[in-house]
Amino acid sequence: MVLRLLGVFTALFLLLSLIGAGGVMYVFYTFGSGLPDYHQLNDYEPPVMTRIHAGDGRLLAEYAIEKRVFVPITAIPRRVARAFLAAEDQHFYDHMGVDPIGVARAMVTNLRNIGSGRRLQGASTITQQVAKNFLLTNEVSYRRKIQEAILALRIEKVLTKDRILELYLNEIYLGYGSYGVAAASLNYFNKSLGELTVAEAAYLAALPKAPNNYDPIRKRDAAVERRNWVIGRMFEEGFVDAVQRDQALSEPLIVRERSETEFVTAEYFAEEVRRELADRYGEDGLYKGGLSVRTTIDPNLQNMAQKSLRDGLIAYDRRHGYRGPVARIAADGAQSLPADWLAKLRETAVPKGLPKTWFLAAVDKASNDSAEILFSDASKGTIPLAELRWAREALKDQKRGPSIKRARDVLKAGDVVLVEAVTERKNSKGEATSYPEGTYALRQMPEIQGSLVALDPHTGRVLAMVGGFSYQQSEFNRATQAKRQPGSAFKPFVYLAGMDQGFTPSSIVLDAPFVIDQGPGLPKWRPANYTKKFYGPSTLRLGIEKSRNLMTVRLAQELGMERIADYSGRLGIYDRLPERLAMSLGAGETTLLRLTTAYAMLVNGGKTIRPSLIDRIQDRNGRTVFRHDDRPCPDCDAMRWTRQAVPRVPDTRTPVTSPASAYQVVSMLEGVVKRGTGRRIASLNRPLAGKTGTTNSSLDTWFVGFSPDLAVGVFMGFDEPRSLGRKETGSSVAAPVFKSFMGAALKDQPTIPFRIPDGIRLVRINARTGKLARDSDSNVILEAFKPGTVPTAQSEAEEMDSRTYGGSGAPALGTGGLY
């Protein structure tokens, strides 16, 4: 009988077990089929913001959809991880994805709370939350809960506990725009994770369920209560002792506003970097990839560049007159402001890109000596006549109206104008006159635009880039996107081709009328010098120093435009230059960055470089995935440099010309600064070289040049090309910006002369004739010659035959193309 009953019970047990197993299998089959592939979590990387840094490490820009900083589990402090374990899943390291004890506890608690109106507990483990956050929706249903549990069991089979916890702590949203614990630590407490106290870590651990319910300001009592509950759980789990618990419970909940991140201001440069990263890694890689990008920009040089260009644009604009007020808030002919002037002033649109120190003001009244102005905060100020004298009326064709003798000649009641506070005024001698507080100067947003680029000529690293007066006013980058004619700024590369073909700076070329028949139906081309004069036989040095067009065209004809086009391509100025003689005078179109890079190749000894904005890119795990400097260096181990010589890194730059030819052009461009069209720069008393550029009708103006270790280019012109004015040239418009920037950039730097390559001989030459200097000559310079090209005593003969050799073995040019 006993055995029969035992058999019955055994059969019933087996039957129930089979039914239970079948039920489990049915649940797994019904709810487990069609679930997302959990294996993807093996390779999952949460979206992390990309950070762009300047050359000195300061932040330049951030790009993200979710502003998250990913922190590996090994770098997350134990107290932070334990706070979340205590609050969310104390058996995390013991269960297999679903916590039976937690489920039972939640069921008991929910039965007790029936009818109380309290929120039901779900007993989700951290693994279940990872399954929900990464692979499921937020749907509230028993079906989603079962799927969550099934996925959690599967996830535990393919991921380690530490990896699951790492995903959780970096993915969860904790309010205040904080994705992950690292961002929350900064946004709530202005601290890194390692600086958090037990109480602060406990507060963050209190947030995952409902951040809005525990807002530390709007719902402070609930936030403190929830934080204290987490601290209690940490004590129960043995994560803190009684002393730590009591100290944490007594600590006030104080949130601190996140410190304003110090950004380097270089919007045009940052946008160029953003474009390059998007091209290289795509939009997802840029906004979610967590890249750490170290750029080439030097913040100090960038600030100098921005100030120099802005000052230059304003200076040109002031020379060409005042275009009137921003707006009028009084009827024409009114002698005073209307009663509602303050409201109207506040409604006046502020011009885009307004400098931070400029403000809108309403003119209250204007007299002979000054104008009284009012601001939107009802404060007052004065504009003296001395700060209005520049504001002659702007007329057509860059002309100006009569001189300003009274303040009311410029301003009248109701004018809304731009002003800037001033404390002193300097006269032409540099003598300063102090102004009382509340004194302002009239300002005007310039119409002219421009750009400035500075780069390292040895590496191509772009150290500063400004693409216009203001990025807020116009995002168009005139350093990289504006294709304009360089004019005479292209001439040095014609001369470079000549140096490679045996000409020297002392070679003679005829400066005389030149006519080219361009073919049937086309007018004859008659280039001319800027001065409309002809100067006869002249040295190539003189031709480039004085920017003689006719000499350049004759040299280009002798060399052949095919050769000139080849040089322009090798130097990266043009992709494909039309082989027409007009191109030798800079009639093609290029960008400031490309032209400045070509000039850099002159001063670096003729080595090819490519401009670079990025030094290095690291992925979210700190691995370097891109380096601009890709030279091999197996011995570059910093830890060993204290014990052995610094390793030698090979020079992998490709020569584009010989160092000797490059130096000869550098020497001639140094003459441009000392004696030629760039002589206003000579007052800096530094080794500087460069070339002006002015196109027909003064549509575009340039100055591109360098010191031995810094290449700089400046472009200025209107976006819709029109004449800058009859007497405006690269010398008057662009060169002052170059001078201002170089003066600031080199101020505290040692004076370094241009490097002379091996084989170059410096010989005393008569600068006018290009022949060996006599003792009686006064116009003597040291000229650079290659071996075998130094003039002989025979070349000092008084008579000059157009077929004699100009000191170099190259024939003088004078008959080709002359009609």
Image: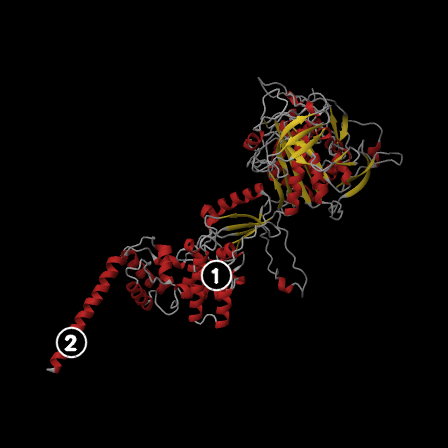
Instruction: State the SS at label 1.
Output: loop
Residue lying farthest to the top in this orientation: 521
State the mark number for residue 9: 2
Question: Horizontal and vertical percent for residue 116?
Answer: 30, 60
Q: Amino acid at mark 1?
A: Pro
Q: Give whichever of 366, 145 is nearer the camera.
A: 366
Q: Is residue 603 visible?
A: yes
Q: Amino acid at mark 2?
A: Phe
Q: Residue at x 69, y 40 (%)?
A: 741
Label count reads 2
205 in relation to 494, above or below: below
Q: Residue at x 45, y 58 (%)?
A: 221
Q: Which residue is mark 1?
A: 72
Dot 1 crowding, Cα within 10 Å, few <14, some 14–19, many 20+: some
Instruction: State the SS at label 2.
Output: helix
Question: Horizontal and vertical percent for residue 39?
Answer: 36, 59
